[in-house]
Amino acid sequence: MKSYYGTIAECWKPTFENVTREFITDNLYKILFSEELPNFRFEFREDEAIKFIEDILYNYTKKYDFYKEESQKILQSIKKKSDGNTLSPVMIVEDYKKFFELLRQFYERDIELYFLRTKMSGFTRYEKDNCFEQIWLRATPDDFNNPEEFLRRQVEMINDKTFEKYDNETYLGPVNFLDNHILYVENGIARTWDENSREIRFTIYDKKYYKNTELFYRPHYSLPKIRYGIYQKDGKKVCSIGSIQNINNEKNDINKKVNREKYKVNSGVPEEDTYKVEPKNLLVLSLFINLLHKHNITEIEVPSLYVLDYEYHQKRHKQQSLEFDKKWTEWEIKVDPEQYKIESKYLKDNIGKEDLISELKTERLLLTFRRLLNHYTNARINSYPGDSDSFMHLNIPVVQSEKELKGNIFRELYQLFGETNIER
């Protein structure tokens, strides 16, 4: 058993016994029936799997009599065979031992990343539940038909060390078109409800202050973060890019500079190719592609549909609204009117935006990649979602010279990484 930076209860350690017991007795019911989570069913194709789950529930209800009703509902659900006409999505599990072992492996690494991310002294039930209940938010329709392969990829991606040298914020250099303010990169840790387990963050620091790390606050601008995962396929590394997520920034001079200069990426581009493509997303995507090229990664996949995402945001926003109404009594509003305004605006900006969120993660993300190919002249789309699976598959060969790029901004960003300087 691995040692961690903090403590973890014996019953939550990542053993096969613990993972199967906790998932089946604590998380499976919520996945099937909770009003706060998107619901879907499991269909375990092996009779042995049904018996395995039944035995765990039987032993658990012998100790905890109150769980009998929930136990019966779980068994009733997993014994029901899918006829293809169910309203609720169904995850088909062909090999339950492989399914739970891969979930265990993912959970083991998730614990490590939890301690690295939080610096907490102890592992929490909340984080265990998040892992077992929310990893499925990343699943596409193909993944529901083959969750063992989905988990195998998730395990490989969460354990990937390609960008570990950037786990601490790393200097890249001055950005000319942004008045030579200084660009840094960091390989961050995402959350289990995010589209991937890792995220790349690019930050532009004010050139006057970037060296002064003793300052409590150094003026900066955070570009959108890219959630990604890297795994092996047919002997090559493939980068799966799940989302480009905007970050709220302080209003400062660099913020104004970026928002003014970002439109230079559209110079010489037909107006129809700028439709629904955020210039900042193009900037950060180009930076990330250049980073992938430093490691000779040229194969990219982009998911087109997350099965559970829409329902997740519907239920999450409903819960946020209820919590907001409960928290902000007339008295609380009088005590802290400024914070009330901030949280009220956040709620207004997010509630009921499920359609927009879905569009940002699917249509607009795919449009951003298609637009990027205007600037990487040797790049190509190998297949679109629906051709063979739920992903757009692209090949963007390592750029050998800035002559292979269209647009002064993209050439300048390329120069930050150096010509054909591949790291092994």
Image (cartoon, rainbow, N blue to C red):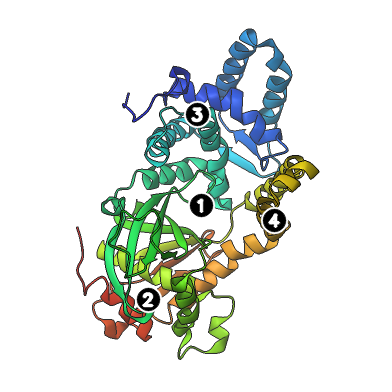
The numbered mark, 3 or 2, whose residue comes first in the sequence reads 3
Q: Is residue 296 visible?
A: no
At mark 2, the secondary structure is: loop
Nearer the observer: mark 4 or 2; the answer is 4
* Residue 372 % position (x, y): 44, 76
- Other-residue count near label 2 (Cα within 10 Å), few / some / many at <14 / 14–19 / ≥20: some
Nearer the observer: mark 3 or 4; the answer is 4
What's the CA distance linking mark 4 and mark 1? Answer: 30 Å
Q: Is residue 113 left or right of residue 191?
A: left
CB contact under 8 Å: marks 1 and 3: no
User: For mark 1, what is the residue?
Assistant: 195
User: For mark 2, what is the residue?
Assistant: 379
What's the CA distance linking mark 3 and mark 4? Answer: 32 Å
Q: Is residue 166 left or right of residue 12?
A: left
Q: Is residue 124 left or right of residue 296?
A: right
At mark 1, the secondary structure is: loop
Disc number placed over residue 124 in the picture, else none: 3
* Residue 308 % position (x, y): 63, 49
What's the CA distance linking mark 4 and mark 2? Answer: 46 Å
What's the residue type where badge 4 is placed? Lys
At mark 3, the secondary structure is: loop
What's the CA distance linking mark 1 and mark 2? Answer: 24 Å
What's the residue type where badge 2 is placed? Ala
What's the residue type where badge 1 is placed? Glu
* Residue 365 % position (x, y): 53, 67
The numbered mark, 3 or 4, whose residue comes first in the sequence reads 3
